[in-house]
Image (cartoon, rainbow, N blue to C red):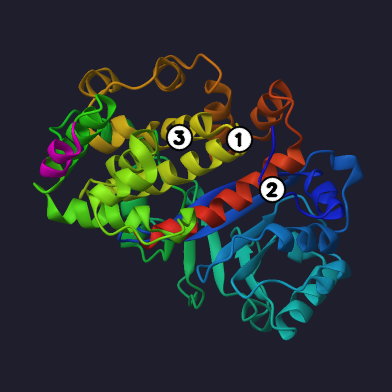
Amino acid sequence: MNAPEPVANVALDVLGTQSICYAPLIDKKRKAIGTRLTMLATNPSERLPIGQVLESLNSVWPESSAPVLVAPLDAEFDESALDWDPPSNAILEISTAALRDPLTQTVAQSLFRDGKRLALRNRPDVALPPALLSCFEYSLVHISDDRRREGDARIPSSITRRIPFIITGVQTVADVDGAFERGAAASVGWPLDDVTQKSARPLQPGQAVVLELLRLVRDDAEISKIDATLKRDPALAFKLLRLVNSAAFGLPVQITSFQHAVMMLGYKKLMRWLSLLMATASKDTNTFPLMHASIRRGMFLESIGADESQVEVRDELFITGAFSLLDRITGAPFEHLFELISLSETIVDAIVRRTGPYAPYLTLIEAIERSDPIMIRKQADALALPIGTCNETLLKSMASAELLDADI
């Protein structure tokens, strides 16, 4: 089992001391505008200096102009943090509990003067000095501590808020809607398991066309028949060509038509792109965060579960991740969807029955999304997967997914 291009051994060793999880930052339009990385020491009794941990991230940083919040949840903020040379889009979180220590306050102000971007995590128990507050670009507020909620009498009338806030801990779409009504800049994560979003609804026209394309490709239909089906939705045809030509999966030549795509990729490889198109064909804005998660799941599974020589396995792992939220994206149960298209039993077993060789990788990425370090460790151990390799692959797959976002 090989991850993409191993990073320097020292950095990988440091990454192996951390349990890293990610969540997208979702804005009011349901678009992913950034990422939050949370970090916990795998062995709390042997924590490394925070500066060393932060520096190890640079070698696998998900390059993008979008902000990346870095949250070392159990780190001690000492002067080693000043040694970190962060990427321009990195925003370091510091908890209000840590800021009770005058030394941490001094470190925070030094970081700010040094041009490093900071975010404040949690509501402070006591008012912080204005000079200290001015160092922070955002504040992260758990929904249970959000004093902006209607009727909350805990809000002192003297308070004037100057820092944009990001809500955490949302459990339902209604929680997210309420936070945006109160002026939140973003939500950390999206309530993937909100039962109110699982009601059955008819497939949208674009989804129906992609399902038909998937069925035709699986049946090795004539290219002319597949092309005629694709032409029923010119917008989808354009989107498919953009995806096939994406920098995330650089091909040696520009693909100019569907026939050209088949010639270059073959039917089996084309399944991968159609599965991505299926996961992103909805126009329901509440499914946008689900699409975002699907892409990252697909990228992670194909990278972590097979090496470069296992092309068919990599493609099937990608489809497993990309289709794993398809019931919530389309509003149709998996049983119905998989009657319409024929996927390999290995993919269906992983998604529907949580059995077979691909299932543990799907459970692993779900544990990462839920920020569940105990389950991450359990799954990584079961797969004989070093935590450092898991972290490296996660961050690199996020970087690859970023390249696709503009084409979705």
Classify mark 3: residues with Cα within 10 Å, few (<14), some (14-19) or many (20+).
many
Spot occupied by residue 385 in the image (x, y as percentages of width and height)? 73, 31
Spot occupied by residue 223 in the image (x, y as percentages of width and height)? 20, 38
Which is more N-terminal, label 3 or label 1?
A: 1
Instruction: Indicate the secondary structure of the residue bearing disc 3.
Output: helix
Picture residue at 40% right of the left edge, 15% below the top:
345
Residue situated in front as seen by the camera: 68 or 11: 11
Question: Residues in magenta?
Answer: 222-228
Residue 102 in sight: no
Q: From the image, tell me which residue sits under label 1.
A: 309
- Give the farthest residue toward the right: 46
**How far, Cα to Cα, is label 2 from label 1?**
20 Å
- Give me the disc on residue 65: none
Spot occupied by residue 277 in the image (x, y as percentages of width and height)? 29, 45
Classify mark 1: residues with Cα within 10 Å, few (<14), some (14-19) or many (20+).
few
- Give me the disc on residue 392: 2
Which is more N-terminal, label 1 or label 2?
A: 1
Q: Eyeballing the image, is 40 above or below 31? A: above
Q: Quadrant of the N terminus?
A: top right
Spot occupied by residue 118 in the image (x, y as percentages of width and height)? 64, 71
Tell me which secondary structure the magenta stretch mostly adopts. Answer: helix
Q: Eyeballing the image, is 109 above or below 407? A: below
Residue type marked 3 = Gly
Residue situated in front as seen by the camera: 281 or 70: 281
Which is more N-terminal, label 2 or label 3?
A: 3
Instruction: Indicate the secondary structure of the residue bearing disc 1.
Output: loop
- Give me the disc on residue 321: 3
Instruction: Indicate the secondary structure of the residue bearing disc 2.
Output: helix
Magenta region includes residue 312: no
Q: Is residue 204 left or right of residue 351?
A: left
